[in-house]
Image: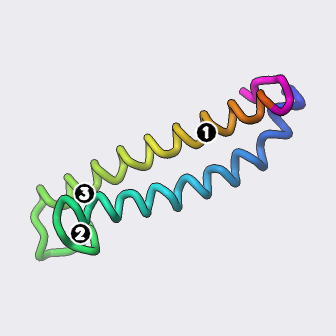
Amino acid sequence: MKASTIAYKPVGWALGAAAGALAGLVFKQAWKLIEGADEAPAATDEDRTWREIMIAAALQGAIFAAVKAAVDRSGAVATRRVTGTWPG
């Protein structure tokens, strides 16, 4: 394993945590725009339809994946700029 990969691990973990928090905020705002509600439906909420729950879950997953990819890629690019080596 390359030294840059090992050195990037803690940075990657911190970026992953930040990406998760950011994705949560983005999803909450997106859900407010779509449904006008502050809270997305929980899978066990019997007052919500399957359609609502599945749309919320798909949207949350898509937002999380996009934010995580953007944060991971930005971290890798920044690491290459600093060290001259791609961390992957």
Q: Position of residue 27 (x, y in %)?
A: 36, 58
The residue tagged 1 is 72
Disc number lying in front (2 or 1): 1
The residue tagged 3 is 56
Residue 27, disc: none
Q: Where is residue 11 in the image (x, y as percent from the top left)?
A: 75, 47
SS class of the residue under badge 3? helix
Asked if marks 3 and 2 touch (Cβ < 8 Å), the reply is: yes
Disc number lying in front (1 or 3): 1
Give, as a three-letter code, the residue at label 2: Pro
* Left or right, residue 54 beside residue 2: left
Q: How crowded is mark 1: few (under 14 residues within 10 Å), some or many (20 or more)?
A: some
Q: Which of marks 1 and 3 is nearer the N terminus?
A: 3
Q: Is residue 33 magenta?
A: no
Q: In this picture, is 47 found above or below 79?
A: below
* Left or right, residue 39 beside residue 10: left
Q: Which residue is drawn at 69% across and 30% down?
A: 77
Residue 41, disc: 2
Quadrant of residue 52 in the image? Answer: bottom left
* Left or right, residue 8 beside residue 17: right
Q: Is most of the magenta stretch helix, strand or loop?
A: loop
Q: Which residue is drawn at 34% across and 64% down?
A: 28
Q: What stretch is highlighted in magenta?
A: 82-88
Q: Position of residue 45 (x, y in %)?
A: 20, 74
Give, as a three-letter code, the residue at label 1: Asp
- Count of residue discs: 3
Q: Which residue is drawn at 84% across and 37% down?
A: 6
Q: Residues within 10 Å of mark 3 (few under 14, many from 20)?
A: many
Quadrant of residue 80 in the image? Answer: top right
